[in-house]
Structure formats: structure tokens, C-alpha cells
């Protein structure tokens, strides 16, 4: 039988040539497959109903893809099977792996062993802002001619990719708190030994994995406990849970945020579209004034954490300033999908109440002439549950018009735990908000075409494809 892999026991074979990835079409698994191919390994992959764009991308890279999970896909005898976290122990390939006695591991274990091995990792963790923050980190390392590798959960527009192998000493990694694999229910970030770690926030999320906030907190506690005394943790000062967690730790700690006694502090902020301009203080002295195309204080705080990490790595101030001006953000993060008849259609990944609130608050000052029409589709395993039912209403306070869709996959959630979009709209109206409920995307599109006017921005928030609403709205306008 195949052993449950644990890097501490160094079970991944020393001599690996052929690697198979089960569930290869996910963002991270696809990136790993491409990295392994670039490193010279023979790579195959499989997925349930192989789907583009990842399937096309992988085939262009010369990676053989099997459509569907089947034990026969492993008959050629790979030296290692990497099993994605969506794969169950009863998956035909997981069963075949054990029957054949093939070595297997999880995605983060493979990243550690092959891509990050011998390099210093800069790991970004936290409930919010991981993708944008790790993307900024990767870009600054690149601008500093440090030839970084990176593996991030979104497509960086500067590279048009979510991964880069690189040959330099550093690797930027988005450290996810979601579980690792069916044989390892611990968070993915526990597999990394960071040279520098950034911790942006600790809130309750992933209700399908974590029981409650204390369960989430314990995962981050375990992560911080494992950071060595030679490493640096950069921690946000505006989150009480983060501040509690960093007490009496063996690693070096740098705080950042708005508190006067923090080592890195966000000073004056102004908006001059398309720029956010912000002052940075280091140990009470001016570090400089920077500008970025990113919107919102939450993004400037994320930028501040990256400035702290970059300075710790000895990157010059001028390079940091230039990198922020050239940073093009990540797809699906405040991404303008198009402008028609003076109406801006923007796509954002926000789904947690905090992210929804901060995103709306961030976008509003950049469009002072028109209204902000907030469009929200709850579709994550957490947002489709009623855990945040009473918290969501206040998240929309800065929007002028609010459109809420019924969750599209509600039957996946037990009846007594289901989120109600109708109740959210009722609660918004009690707060005197101009809010509307929609049973489906077609009804919402019809309303938006009739309602949106020149100068308005339609901010569409969902972590899914949302029935291609962005493209359809632009065409209808």
C-alpha cells in the first residue's frame, strides 16, 4: 500500500523522472505541472471532464492530459503521483496508486520538494489579500533583477501567468489555509518553511473545513509556532487576532499598519485617479511617497507589508517605488472588463463580508461622478451558508444600488444552514439601501441594462464565472 506522505519522513523518492498529477486542471495543480515540465520531468495529468482554459494551456506545454479519472492512467508507472486536494480517497486513481504501491504526495509537498527546494520562500498568509500581496511581492523581486520563482492563486497581469520557475534565490508563494489532501487535512501553509512570512488577517472563513473562528485561529497558531528563529514574520497591527497570535514568538517580528508604534506605518493617503498616493513611515521616519494603480486602503496596507518584506531583503527604495507604479494587479481583482456608453463593468473576487465591504469602499472614490452598483453572487462554501447572514448587510453601506443573486448551488448546503439572499435584501432595505433580489442571472442582467447610466460603475463580485455576466452585460449595453 502507498504510504501517507509526510516530508518529515522524506518519502518522496530521490530519483524521480515521471510524475502524474491527479486533478491537474485546478489553478495551482496546473501551475505545478508546468513548472515540473520546465524542470525537465515527464509530466502527465488527469481531471474530471478536462476543461479549458487550463487543459488547452497544459497541452500547449506538451503535457499529456487524460480526460476523466481512471486507474488505467497510471499503468505506465509514474515515479510519483501528486494528488489534488479535491480528490477523495475513493477516486479510481487514488485507489490504483495505493494498489500499485506508487509514491504519492500533495501539491504543497511537491512544490516544496521540486520548485522551492534550496530557495528562500516569501510566504503570504491570511484570510484576506493573499493573492494580491504575493503578486506584488513576486513583481518587486522581478523588478529587482532577482529572477524569482512564484506560485500564486491568480493570473498576474505583468506575467500573464500564475507561476514562474525562475533561477533566483527567492520564491513567492501564496500560503493557503485550506486543507492539503484527503490524507492530510492540515492547512497547505504548514508545509512551507518561510524565510519571510506575511500575515494579513485572521478571520473565520472556509466553513466547510473549519468549525468556528477558534479552529481557524489554531491553524494560524500552529503555522506561526513553526516559523524558525532565523525567519521574519511581518504582521498586520489592525487585527486583534493577529496581534494576539504574534506574542512571545521565537521568530523576528515586524509590525505594519496604522498604529503609531508599528515599525512600518501607512501615512497620508490621497486619490488622484488612476493613482492611489500614499506616504510610508519606517521606525517613525519617512520612507517615501509611493503611488500605485491599486484602489483602497486595504490594498495599500497589503502594499505596506510587501515594502517591509522587500526592505528586509535589501531591495532599494527606488526599485520598490518603480515596481508599484508598474504593477498591473491580478485578473479578477478590481479588473475593468470594459466600458460601454460611459458605464464601467468591473470584476472582483470578493465574497467574504470583509472583502465585499473593503472592495466597495475602495472603488467608490475612483468614480465620484456616478453611482456604484454592487452586484453580488454568494457561491463559496462559506457565503452559501448562513454563518455571515447578519454580517453581510453592513458590507454594502457604501454602494448606491445593490443587486443580490440567489446562490446558484444551494442544494449542496444542508437546508437549515442555507444563506438567504432574500433576507439579505430585506435587511438592506431596513438600512434604507436601494437593494434588489434576483432568482437568476438573466433577470439581473435585464435590470442592470435598464438601470445603469453613464458614469456608473457596475462592480460584480463573485468567486465563480457568474454565467459570464461581465461579457453579456457589456454586449447588452
Image (tube, helix red, strand yellow):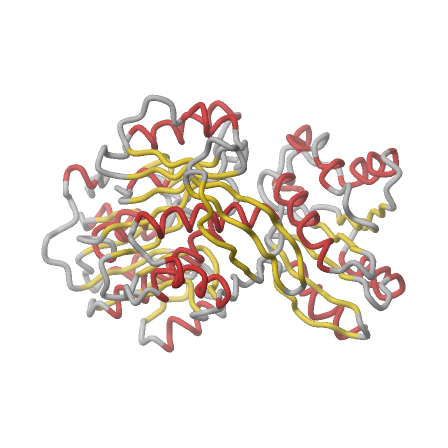
Quadrant that contains the N terminus: top left
Quarter-wise, where is residue 77 in the image? bottom left
Quarter-wise, where is residue 317 in the image? bottom left
Measured as percent of width and height from the top left, residue 163 is found at 37, 63
Q: Nearer the viewer, residue 347 or 292?
A: 292
Residue at the extreme front of the image, as rendered = 285
Residue at screen point 39% across, 45% down: 175
Residue at screen point 32% across, 50% down: 107
Measured as percent of width and height from the top left, residue 80 is found at 21, 55
Q: Nearer the viewer, residue 106 or 286?
A: 286
Residue at screen point 81% across, 50% down: 438
In the rendered view, would you say 88 is above or below 131?
A: above
In the rendered view, would you say 95 is above or below 190?
A: below
Measured as percent of width and height from the top left, residue 382 is found at 59, 38
In the rendered view, would you say 107 is above or below 157?
A: above
Q: Is residue 111 left or right of residue 203?
A: left
In the rendered view, would you say 249 is above or below 307?
A: above
Amino acid at each position: 500500500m502507498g504510504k501517507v506522505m509526510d516530508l518529515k519522513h522524506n518519502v518522496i523518492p530521490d530519483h524521480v523522472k515521471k510524475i502524474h498529477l491527479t486533478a491537474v486542471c485546478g489553478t495551482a495543480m496546473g501551475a505545478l505541472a508546468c513548472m515540473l515540465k520546465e524542470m525537465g520531468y515527464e509530466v502527465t495529468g488527469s481531471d474530471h471532464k478536462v476543461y479549458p482554459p487550463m487543459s488547452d494551456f497544459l497541452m500547449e506545454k506538451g503535457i499529456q492530459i487524460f480526460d476523466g479519472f481512471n486507474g488505467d492512467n497510471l499503468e505506465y508507472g509514474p515515479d510519483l503521483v501528486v494528488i489534488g486536494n479535491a480528490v477523495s480517497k475513493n477516486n479510481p486513481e487514488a485507489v490504483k496508486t495505493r494498489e500499485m504501491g506508487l509514491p504519492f504526495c500533495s501539491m504543497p509537498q511537491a512544490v516544496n520538494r521540486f520548485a522551492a527546494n534550496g530557495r528562500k520562500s516569501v510566504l503570504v498568509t491570511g484570510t484576506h489579500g493573499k493573492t494580491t500581496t504575493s503578486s506584488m511581492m513576486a513583481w518587486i523581486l522581478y523588478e529587482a533583477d532577482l529572477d524569482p520563482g512564484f506560485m500564486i492563486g491568480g493570473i498576474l497581469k505583468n506575467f500573464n501567468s500564475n507561476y514562474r520557475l525562475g533561477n533566483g534565490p527567492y520564491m513567492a508563494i501564496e500560503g493557503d489555509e485550506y486543507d492539503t489532501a484527503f490524507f492530510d487535512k492540515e492547512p497547505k501553509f504548514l508545509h512551507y518553511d518561510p524565510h519571510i512570512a506575511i500575515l494579513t488577517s485572521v478571520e473565520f472563513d472556509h466553513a466547510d473545513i473549519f468549525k468556528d473562528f477558534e479552529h481557524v485561529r489554531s491553524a494560524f497558531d500552529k503555522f506561526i509556532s513553526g516559523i524558525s528563529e532565523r525567519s521574519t514574520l511581518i504582521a498586520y497591527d489592525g487585527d486583534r487576532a493577529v496581534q494576539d497570535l504574534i506574542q512571545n514568538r521565537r521568530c523576528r517580528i515586524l509590525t505594519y499598519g496604522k498604529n503609531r508604534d508599528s515599525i512600518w506605518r501607512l501615512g497620508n493617503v490621497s486619490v488622484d485617479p488612476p493613482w492611489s498616493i500614499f506616504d510610508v513611515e519606517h521606525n517613525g521616519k519617512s520612507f517615501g511617497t509611493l503611488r500605485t494603480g491599486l484602489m483602497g486602503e486595504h490594498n495599500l496596507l497589503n502594499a505596506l507589508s510587501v515594502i517591509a518584506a522587500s526592505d528586509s531583503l535589501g531591495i532599494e527604495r527606488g526599485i520598490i517605488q518603480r515596481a508599484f507604479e508598474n504593477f498591473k494587479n491580478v485578473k479578477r481583482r478590481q479588473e475593468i472588463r470594459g466600458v460601454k456608453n460611459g458605464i464601467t463593468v468591473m470584476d472582483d473576487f470578493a465574497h467574504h463580508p470583509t472583502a465585499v465591504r473593503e472592495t466597495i469602499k475602495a472603488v467608490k472614490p475612483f468614480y465620484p461622478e456616478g453611482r456604484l452598483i454592487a452586484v453580488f453572487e454568494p457561491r463559496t462554501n462559506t457565503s452559501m451558508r448562513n454563518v455571515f447572514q447578519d454580517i453581510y448587510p453592513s458590507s454594502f453601506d457604501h454602494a448606491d444600488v445593490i443587486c443580490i443573486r440567489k446562490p446558484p448551488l444551494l442544494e449542496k448546503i444542508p437546508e437549515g444552514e442555507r444563506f438567504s439572499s432574500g433576507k439579505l435584501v430585506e435587511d438592506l432595505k431596513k438600512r434604507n439601501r436601494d437593494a434588489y433580489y434576483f432568482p437568476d442571472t438573466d433577470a439581473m442582467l435585464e435590470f442592470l441594462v435598464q438601470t445603469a447610466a453613464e458614469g456608473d460603475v457596475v462592480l460584480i463580485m463573485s468567486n465563480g464565472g457568474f454565467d459570464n455576466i461581465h461579457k453579456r452585460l457589456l454586449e447588452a449595453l
